[in-house]
Amino acid sequence: MRGSTTGQPLNATFDLLGRRWALSVIWVLRHGAMPFLEIQAELEGISSSVLTTRLRELREAEVVTVDGAGRYLLTPEGEDLGKALRPLIDWSAAWSERTGGPPAPAGNRQRRRTKR
């Protein structure tokens, strides 16, 4: 798996899931099979080339597959991944509630200007 020079399965998993839109694709497919254009419509803002790449990577990782009608769906591995993510989803919801939400990404924070 790309990004895992140590060969550690957890590092490879974080690499796969840390790619832009990967978790969103898995999230959208949690309710069942969907054609490409429907996935793209659900993920407002994703380009077709990025979606194609993410679906290919998730298929190579055996998290997503394609049925006979050309619809994408989670494999049993993908469904297990969704179950494994549930505690993280629960934690993040509680964390957001306790702290008033996650901090803005570094690129979105306003920088204070200091006078010299």
Image: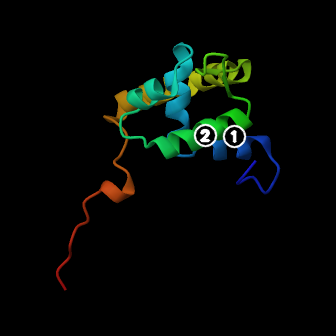
- Residue sitting nearer the eye, 70 or 53: 70
Residue 44 position in % (x across, y down): 36, 34
- Residue sitting nearer the eye, 36 or 16: 36
- Residue sitting nearer the eye, 75 or 81: 75
For this view, does 96 lie left or right of residue 1?
Answer: left
Residue 30 position in % (x across, y down): 55, 18
Instruction: Residue at 19%, 86% (x, y): give it.
Output: 116
Classify mark 1: helix, strand or loop.
Answer: helix
- Way the structure is coloured: rainbow
Tell me the crowding category of disc 1: few under 14, some 14 to 19, or many 20 or more residues within 10 angstroms, Cα based.
some
Residue 26 position in % (x across, y down): 56, 28
Q: Are marks 2 and 1 in contact (CB under 8 Å)?
A: yes
Instruction: Residue at 60%, 40% (x, y): give it.
Output: 17
Tell me the crowding category of disc 2: few under 14, some 14 to 19, or many 20 or more residues within 10 angstroms, Cα based.
some
For this view, does 5 lie left or right of residue 75?
Answer: right
Residue at image mark 1: 13
Could you say which disc has been placed on residue 17 in the image? 2
Q: Quadrant of residue 42?
A: top left
Position above or below: 69 against 62: above
Instruction: Residue at 72%, 17% (x, y): give it.
Output: 76
Instruction: Residue at 51%, 28% (x, y): give it.
Output: 36
Could you say which disc has been placed on residue 2 in the image? none
* Residue type indicated by callout 1: Thr
* Residue type indicated by callout 2: Leu
